[in-house]
Image (cartoon, helix red, strand yellow):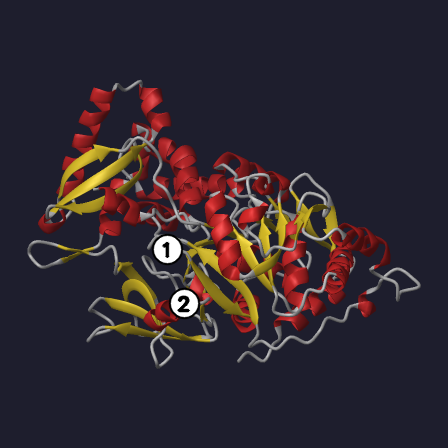
Amino acid sequence: MMKQNLVATLQQAIRDNWSRKAISDYKGEIYTYGDVADKIAWIHHLYQKAGIKKSDKIVVLGKNSSRWAICYLATITYGAVIVPILPDFKPDDVHHIINHSDAIVLFADDSLFENLDPESIPHIEFVVSLNDFSLLFGRKKSLRQILEKSLKNYLPHLENPMTAADIQYPKIPNEELAAMVYTSGTTGFSKGVMLAHNSLISNIIFAQEHMPLVAGNSIVSFLPIAHVFGCAFEFLFPFSRGCHITFLKKIPSPRIIVKAFQEIRPHLILSVPLVIEKIYRKQIKPKIDKPLIRGLLALPLVSKLIHRKLNKALSAAFGERFSEIVVGGAAFNADVEDFLRKIKFRFTVGYGMTECGPLISYTNWREYVPRSCGRIVDQLELRIDSPDEFNEVGEILVRGENVMMGYYKNKDATAAAIDPEGWLHTGDLGVKTADDTILIKGRSKSMILGPSGKNIYPEEIEAKLNNLPFVLESIVLDRNEKLVALVYPDMEAVDQEQLSEKELTKRMEANRRELNSILPGYMSVSSIEIYPEEFEKTPKKSIKRFLYQISN
């Protein structure tokens, strides 16, 4: 169990940074740490008057916002359990999660609550708006009066305005349940991952000791904070440091993200590969693909100058001030990674999963090993389930402070994930180096056994295919013992070239031949089929592979 306490750490962050900017919505109202404390006090009072007990489940459903963050902080510092739900879940899925979690209170964006049926969530006693903290729904008539009174009477014991010295949250042991995170993952079945206070504070302390943020720094939060990656490293960690967090409320496009980066100039950037890859393909690749530039890059002295300029241009796109970009959540395209290393761009790749709240491995950008996802974090042990951990691929197993308590009301799934010795079976395949650096080879559930008995990791093929012309994203499947690639085209590039459907099909066939020329024979793709829409993804922006395996 971690020595540092989660609630005490958040309490100290508020006290130490009382007058600093804490959170704000992009182009919206700014809350200082003192303002956040004031709102937390109000929600605590509301919970008390409404009879909410410690360990009761509180759902928060909405896009990234300051009020979402305040609701989260207020709930875990009260001792209740936060249940964040991604805003893009369908209403039936939201109903199911609310009911399965046994939640009794819901904080929701007005527009999202309009799509829900209160009769389908009978245990919810009241619903509070994330737009303005008004009451959207209540089963008891007295609730509206409680809410209205709480706005006036939540600080009756203070004769003067609240100060940092007044902040005193209850002592919540780290072994208590803090959050239940539901994610469909890549198996297609939602499970409630139970994260103790210990898991969250373990992630925060590791970040404090290894990631370069200090009080007063700025950070942009654009990953969904209902998911653990965004929540831990774009919200809880920087908040614990006294940073100013700006939330991009809408699901942002790379163009909007870049605009915000250039205005706010964050000191640390967290991202999924998809965003970096899109910015690279739109802003950098067209430049280096020009015949003149390609020729100049072949000249050693000139290429160094060009690399410096490309590094400067790409750094400027991200606000220039960042110490590093931490990429995680999905596999990084190998060609993009190689190019970024070549120009000495400040990035590193980490690895994690919801069940670890989320971090498993990370190394700073200067020490990052190519093709790896960093070194196992201090609070975890690592084991590769194979006869030779360094050379023979096996399942990645981890054990330690970050690991979840289990899946809510699902003993069978918990037993399948965590063995009797406490090892969490990640479902990912890889090898390790002598210093516990992890090199992931694929997911055990996506591995294809080739006709010759060789293991095929479709992610490796997809990484190469995604770098070919007119390919935005792809998925490689086993169909009748042949590898077939589904490709969602880069429609912007297709439109620019004014390609007909027939011409696009020919280009894809050319891509297939080029792809096979750089792959071992047993990994050859037999055909490429054009898919008409973007592939459905998990919160981590990984393709829901199972959907396409079922349909094919």
Residue at the disc numbered 1: 189
Residue 284, placed above or below residue 218: above
Q: Residue at x 32, y 24 (%)?
A: 494
Residue 387, placed above or below residue 438: below
Q: Where residue 101 sits in the image (x, y, percent)?
A: 52, 61
Q: Secondary structure at mark 2?
A: loop
Amino acid type, residue under disc 2 in the picture: Asn
Residue at the disc numbered 2: 410
Q: Residue at x 58, y 80 (%)?
A: 3
What crowding class fits label 2: few (fewer than 14 Cα within 10 Å), some (14-19), or many (20 or more)?
A: few
The answer, for residue 436, to whether it is visible in the render is no
Q: Residue at x 68, y 76 (%)?
A: 171
Residue 9, placed above or below residue 140: below
Sooner in the amino-acid sequence: mark 1 or mark 2: 1
Residue nearer the viewer, 90 or 324: 90
Q: Secondary structure at mark 1?
A: loop
Q: Where residue 428 sits in the image (x, y, percent)?
A: 30, 62
The answer, for residue 55, to whether it is visible in the render is yes
Amino acid type, residue under disc 1 in the picture: Phe
Q: Where residue 281 sits in the image (x, y, percent)?
A: 38, 36
Residue nearer the viewer, 98 or 399: 98
Q: Is residue 311 left or right of residue 9?
A: left
In 3D space, how far apart are the residues under numbered discs 1 and 2 (Cα atoms)? 12 Å
Q: Where residue 470 sits in the image (x, y, percent)?
A: 29, 31
Toward the left, the furthest residue is 452
Q: Is residue 104 left or right of residue 450?
A: right
